[in-house]
Image (spheres, rainbow, N blue to C red):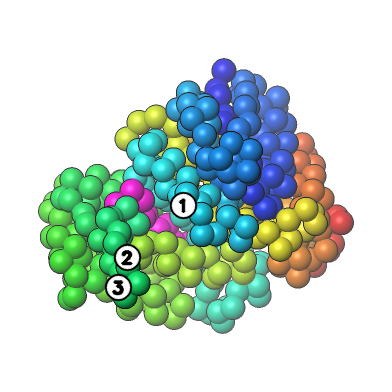
Amino acid sequence: MTRITILPGDGIGPEVIAEAVASLRQLSVQYDLGLEYVSHDFGGVAIDRHGDPLPPETLAACRRGDAVLLGAVGGPQWAGLARTPETGLLELRAALGLFANLRPAKLLDGLAHFSPLRADIAHGADVLVVRELTGGIYFGARRSDANSASDLCEYSRGEIERIAHVAFQAARERRGKLTSVDKANVLATSRLWRQTVIEVAAHYPDVALDHMYVDACAMALVTGPRQFDVILTENLFGDILSDELSVIGGSIGLLGSASVGSEGPGMFEPIHGSAPQIAGMDIANPAGTLASAAMMLDRLGFGDAAQALTSALEYTLLEGCRTRDLGGEASCSGFGARVRENLRAGAGRMTAHRELIAMNRGCCG
């Protein structure tokens, strides 16, 4: 059996997770995957029920599992606490050794009109951001008083080397180009980052490496995203750039992510937040969570099932079934149900014939 630890979390988290788990259950039967699931409190809901955003039993379950599927955490009612839902998320990443965050962003053919960029700029964009996840300013020492505050940004050569290897290996499996993003003209940590990445590049002569300052990269992502294949960067820069990149496809609700380490379970989650303002309304977009579930299946070695889920998800979007953030009328549960219908129908075959899709046909409510 393959054990999946489910962390629904807060806000819309339980809603989008429910659709992903339903699809996983269907795939487990179709492909005889032998998946089993256990759900635990995490984030704000865990604070309310246990006084801790990451209860010991939740952490133990994550460590025992083969993968973790997370919805979303956070909300205004927990802001200002000594340990917020976001604190629990940082602690979980550190405890599981999840130092590499992988965020792919791709503009699907036929959905260019949802992008805020001109079609000729956005068309063909397909970028993977590899973000260092357990170092840098988010994990540095903090100091504050009434008149001043400081946050320490610190990286070691070893931390940079291990994330660089992940990025170079990913580029080798894609189009063979890596852009390392830093601020080496100002920051000492960025100068060490650049020097170390250059040294690691010697092990990957088949991958073309270039360097870009973070401000220049932010501009280039919206003026020429096709120039990028894999972007490698540190924690804070990666957080910002990957969120910027996400809107190229039309909605932050479309994209999933994977956080992995050298060993042990990975964690898979949509890149959007908990969106408490729409929680319980059945209008959230579950596509990012479904994409995360597909990444999880692939990481677990279930490549055929992962491709089937990806194909069904893409086909559902292309045939015109879309949630409100994409201008459609589909509910969260209705969108998930349609994905599962397409899974049963054989989404791989349908995706191979996208030219037959009636792009504007509504399909669910």
* Res. 310 visible in picture: no
Residue positioned 57% across, 29% down in the render: 4
- Asked if marks 3 and 1 touch (Cβ < 8 Å), the reply is no
The residue that label 1 is drawn on is: 82
Read off the residue under disc 2: 144
- Spot occupied by residue 236 in the image (x, y as percentages of width and height): 36, 62
Res 27 → quadrant: top right
Give the spatial CA distance, label 3 vs label 1: 19 Å
Q: Is residue 314 magenta?
A: no
Q: How many marks?
A: 3
Magenta stretch secondary structure, dominant: strand
Q: Position of residue 13 (x, y in %)?
A: 65, 48
If you read the primary sequence from the N terminus, does the residue marked by circle 1 or circle 2 appear first?
Answer: 1
Q: Which residues are magenta?
A: 126-135
Residue under label 3, please give it: 148
Question: 9 above or below 194?
Answer: above
Q: Secondary structure at mark 2?
A: strand
Quadrant the C terminus occupies: bottom right
Spatial separation of the CA atoms under disc 1 and disc 2: 14 Å
215 and 118: which is toward the camera: 215
Earlier residue among tags 3 and 1: 1
Q: Determine the residue positioned at 39% across, 29% down.
A: 264
Drawn side of residue 342 relative to residue 299, left or right: right
How far across and down, in percent of the image, does residue 22 sit?
Answer: 73, 36
Looking at this view, is 141 or 193 the one in front? 141
Apparent side of residue 190 relative to residue 349 in the rendered image (left or right): left
Task: Give the amino acid at mark 3.
Answer: Ser
> In the drawing, does residue 329 fall left or right of residue 152?
right
- Percent across and percent down for residue 256 are 55, 51
